[in-house]
Image (cartoon, rainbow, N blue to C red):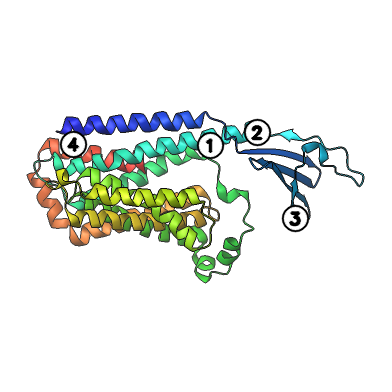
């Protein structure tokens, strides 16, 4: 039975990776960008499938207009400016598009492995480990991994906060009394660490009571909750996304009614995994804001410190005796498996 499940998981991973990498090397044909720059004047032309040119000219004051049925030759900059030479940046946009899809595809594969790996800690041990022990181990290993890998990641990952903070979020942050007193990094780390702690803890409790299939699928409710909340907040959501949300939600309902999973899944575990998705979605939404305001390295480190301290505190207050019993009764193989789970979920996935 376990071999069949692993085969299905690997097959799904292969299919997903093939799709992602096929898309990664496909040019996004619907958008093409042309740009021109001279001194303080920046001109950017974006063409879409509607054959309209959206032109944005910056010279101290921003102005945007739409030119119907125009071509790049119709755009002229006068008043002493040289004749514009439009540089086609389609290749740069394509490379960025590919890199983004490859990164997202790789992260998707990592997250897809998380629930089965975590579930194995309860399926293949002679003595079930305490949830709070797994939670603390994953969080601490994640913190160590972030500290160890941050110098390398800083060299290859662009920092969104370094691109300038002229948004309303930045102004609101400047008016935040707590942020001025203890710093934006601390406030962001405390908030994100709390949401991530709640999500991870709830997810682990859910996985200890349900199957890895249900846990992995339900946790992906995050991808449905985030666009719904953004739509409620006024962010334009395409109709295709709304249709996908409806189809996915129906799939979740059908999936959780699978009678073949009744022996290893429970309603309580499913509810906890769905609640974890809510916490993770909140984390994603808040990360979108804080990521533009706080340097990435500081943000991730303070978030993991907060998450680790909360997990260790919970273990000390409510799981100490249960952990001591597990350590005294478990075999070497049990401890080895728990260590592998903590390393994979803490270091690789985090």
Whichever of labels 4 and 2 marks the residue nearer the N terminus, that label is 2
Whichever of labels 4 and 3 marks the residue nearer the N terminus, that label is 3
Disc 3 target residue: 62
Residue reaching furthest to the bottom? 177
Which of discs 4 and 2 lies nearer the camera? The answer is 2
Mark 4, secondary structure of its residue: helix
Which quadrant is home to the C terminus?
A: top left
Residue 334 falls in image quadrant: top left
Disc 4 target residue: 336
Q: CA distance from mark 1 to mark 4?
A: 34 Å
Image coordinates of residue 309 in percent, x first then y, are 32, 56
Q: Nearer the viewer, residue 196 or 141?
A: 196
Image coordinates of residue 183 in percent, x first then y, are 51, 62
What numbered label is drawn on residue 155?
A: 1
Mark 1, secondary structure of its residue: helix
- Near mark 1 (Cα within 10 A), the count class, few <14, some 14-19 or many ≥20, is few
Which of discs 4 and 3 lies nearer the camera? The answer is 3
Residue at 87 percent across and 37 percent down: it is: 83
Which of discs 1 and 2 lies nearer the camera? The answer is 2
Image coordinates of residue 201 in percent, x first then y, are 27, 55
Disc 2 target residue: 90
What numbered label is drawn on residue 22?
A: none
- Horizontally, residue 154 falls left or right of residue 348, namely right
Residue at 15 percent across and 52 percent down: it is: 323
Asked whether residue 152 is in view, the answer is no
Whichever of labels 2 and 3 marks the residue nearer the N terminus, that label is 3
Q: Judge whether 341 appears above or below 232 on screen.
A: above
């Amino acid at each position: 039975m376990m071999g069949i499940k692993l085969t299905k998981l690997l097959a799904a991973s292969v299919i997903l990776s093939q799709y992602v990498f096929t898309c990664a090397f496909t040019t996004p044909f619907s958008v093409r960008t042309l740009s021109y720059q001279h001194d303080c004047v920046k001109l950017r032309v974006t063409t879409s499938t509607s054959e309209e040119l959206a032109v944005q000219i910056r010279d101290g004051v921003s102005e945007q207009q739409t030119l119907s049925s125009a071509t790049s030759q119709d755009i002229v900059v006068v008043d002493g400016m040289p004749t514009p030479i439009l540089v086609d940046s389609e290749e740069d946009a394509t490379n960025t598009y590919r890199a983004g899809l490859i990164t997202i595809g790789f992260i998707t594969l990592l997250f897809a492995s998380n629930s089965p790996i975590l579930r194995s800690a309860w399926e293949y041990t002679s003595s079930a480990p305490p949830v709070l022990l797994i939670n603390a181990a994953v969080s601490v290993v994640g913190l160590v991994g972030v500290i160890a890998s941050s110098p390398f990641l800083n060299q290859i990952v662009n920092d969104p906060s370094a691109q300038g903070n002229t948004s309303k979020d930045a102004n609101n942050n400047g008016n935040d009394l707590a942020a001025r007193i203890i710093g934006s990094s601390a406030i962001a780390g405390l908030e994100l660490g709390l949401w991530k702690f709640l999500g991870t803890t709830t997810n682990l409790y859910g996985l200890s009571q349900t199957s890895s299939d249900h846990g992995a699928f339900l946790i992906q409710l995050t991808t449905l909750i985030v666009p719904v909340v953004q739509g409620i907040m006024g962010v334009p959501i395409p109709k295709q996304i709304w249709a996908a949300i409806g189809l996915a939600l129906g799939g979740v309902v059908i999936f959780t009614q699978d009678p073949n999973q009744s022996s290893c899944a429970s309603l309580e575990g499913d509810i906890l995994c769905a609640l974890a998705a809510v916490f993770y979605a909140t984390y994603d939404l808040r990360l979108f804001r804080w990521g533009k305001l706080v340097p990435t390295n500081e943000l991730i480190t303070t978030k993991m410190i907060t998450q680790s301290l909360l997990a260790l505190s919970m273990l000390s207050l409510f799981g100490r005796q249960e952990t001591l019993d597990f350590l005294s009764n478990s075999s070497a193989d049990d401890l080895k498996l728990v260590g592998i789970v903590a390393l994979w979920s803490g270091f690789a996935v985090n």
